[in-house]
Image (cartoon, helix red, strand yellow):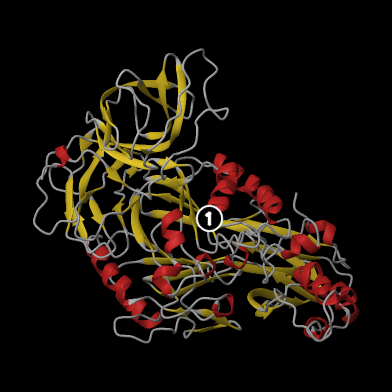
Amino acid sequence: MKTRNLLFIFLLALAGLLLASCNNGKNDPDEGEKIIITNVLLPSSLEIEEGSPVSIELRGTTHIKESDEIVLRSGSGTDYACPIISIEDGDMLKFQLTDEITSGTYKVYVRRAGINNYVGTMALTLLMSLSVDPQPGTTIYGIVHCDGKPVPGALVSDGEFIVKTDNKGIYQIASQKKWKYVFVIIPGGYMVPCQGVLPKFHETLSMPANTPERKDFELIKTDNDKFNLFVCGDFHLAKRNEDIAQFNKLAATLNKAISDSTGPCYIMTLGDMTWDVYWYSNTYQFPQYLETMNGNLSTPFFHTMGNHDNDMNSVGDYNKAFRYTRDIAPTFYSFNLGKIHFIVLDNIDYNNVGTGSDLRSEYKKNYTAEQMAWLAKDLSYVDKSTPVFITSHAPVSYPNGTAWSNTYLNGADSAGEANMTEFLSAVSTHKVHFLSGHTHNIFNRKHSANFSEHNSGAICGSWWWSGHLTSGIHLSQDGAPGGFGIWRFDGTHFTQSFQAGGHDIDYQFRAYDINKVKEYITPDLGGNHKDFTKYSTAMSAYPANTILVNVWDYDPDWTVKITENGKELGVQHVAAYDPLHIVALSGPRCKSSSASSTPSFLTGSWPHFFKATASSATSTVTVTVTDRNGKTYTETMTRPKALSVADYRNK
């Protein structure tokens, strides 16, 4: 059957039978005849070919006449009067769209004698005229187009198969529609339209598995060989701990970094945008998250799914992801920006996990066999000289002191699933940078010449607790500021840096005079709580005159130098607790907790610290840190230097 004969496709559940009077303050104030519109089964979303009439199902008497007009009102308030072609109560209403109407969301009215009578709201998608006979077995097909012209050779996937468009821009997939969506793999030099911050690169499927349905994709030609990517780890927005207000302030830093950039800008999230624990109790789910993002930012977001983006009221990995795939994005997909290929994967596996919040931690960290099979297909289309960036929520490895543990990603227990070793082997054909979140800390590790891992910190820091307990101090458990990564691309070359929220870009380390820290961090700071003792003990164990430096975005390409009166001191790379985080969060949290409780979100030991020992308690030392890009940051510390919270508050 040619698609020209396909008049419309229902995308979402039908809006339902409209039985109530439409006069309830929704009529225009014009003089005219007010009528009650009933029995119109208006779809909430409709796809239709350009030039084709719209057909709306009717159930019984509607009171609509052929002499009436159907009015579509755009979001900007423009009315488009569409003539009725035919109407038969209990069957079908047909009307013709005007040429000026474009894809968008419209309020639908019946106009009689100058008055608009409200029917409902409908999202309308206009499809290019297309004549194609779906091949036997085809269940998803459509066209990829740009400026009204087909785009040959574009890749489209249903999460299992990847196909290329033909010379007419048409793709066809013999899909079982398991994932209930289809997505275009955005080619380099293109972008897609956005709905708010969400790029429209995927479409939801609604028809039965064996029923062909058409899904088109629009591309926008974009010069993005030079572009900027802002990498945002865990948000954990939940309408608690003043998190929305704290995020709004951090978003101001992000917006300034974006506005100061040259070339197109994009945001990549690394999972846990929301916090499933509070989806229902605080009424903060994906729609509310998107409202917060759209209220603060206008930059396109590419999303990665996290463990807290799963619905614990559903059973199993597939069902727990339903709300995410419905409201945000596929759980795994790929796209190109300029000359860089990006792959988004989900390594949080809730397979066979039941319902209930008590099972929230029962996931395994691994890559499913289905993702690994799809990943191999995706990489087969990527030239081996193309840099590949892969994102997932959980890292593939984890610090162990200043060494590394390679057993963090260890949940694979079925054929085809992948832990760290299998995953690294699968992507070894390409040069890969791997971006992750989950830990709420920062580390950078070069596994090999072809694989580098970047655990990228958290927007929320310590789940927004430090700023809640100590105003203006927004830190992760490793003492890194809540903030975001900045990757700037020029062709296949790129740079990496980290921006602290509420600070300028030159805020890259903190240096402590441990003599004064010992005076501040005593057991009493934490109310002598059993879980605070390790912090006061760790501080008192440092030798006299120790200088401790937290360089949160450190990797071996950075250098840390400490001099005293012009003489270079021996610097040791260590794992340590961050004193400011202890003061801002662990102290007050332990002090307010019962003696038998175990407070959460406390300071962790992390391996991006450096220490040296000065010759006296009053000498001046200079800390010089040079980052991977050759930029130098310096602090001259006049000692004794008190640990002052006010010195580090967000601006």
Q: Residue at x 36, y 39 (%)?
A: 223
Q: Is residue 79 above or below residue 167?
A: above
- Nearest the camera: 426 or 26? 26
Q: Callout 1, which amino acid?
A: Phe
- Nearest the camera: 5 or 36? 36
Q: Quadrant of residue 473?
A: bottom right
Q: Residue at x 25, y 54 (%)?
A: 156
Locate residue 390, reporting x and y percent: 40, 64
Locate residue 589, reporting x and y percent: 80, 73
Locate residue 409, reporting x and y percent: 45, 81
Locate residue 76, reporting x and y percent: 49, 26
Q: Quadrant of residue 158?
A: bottom left
Please tell me how many numbered marks the rendered image carries: 1
Q: Is residue 469 left or right of residue 150?
A: right
Quadrant where the image shows the N terminus: top left
Query: Which residue position is annotated with label 1?
Result: 286
Q: Residue at x 31, y 43 (%)?
A: 189
> Would residue 631 be visible to someone looking at this image?
yes
* Neighbourhood count class around disc 1 (C-alpha, 10 Å): few under 14, some 14–19, many 20 upward: many
Q: Is residue 464 above or below residue 166?
A: below
> Would residue 630 be visible to someone looking at this image?
no
Q: Residue at x 42, y 81 (%)?
A: 352
- Nearest the camera: 29 or 343? 29
Q: Is residue 298 above or below residue 362?
A: above
Q: Is residue 460 left or right of residue 545?
A: left
Q: Secondary structure at mark 1?
A: helix
Q: Is residue 144 above or below residue 25?
A: below
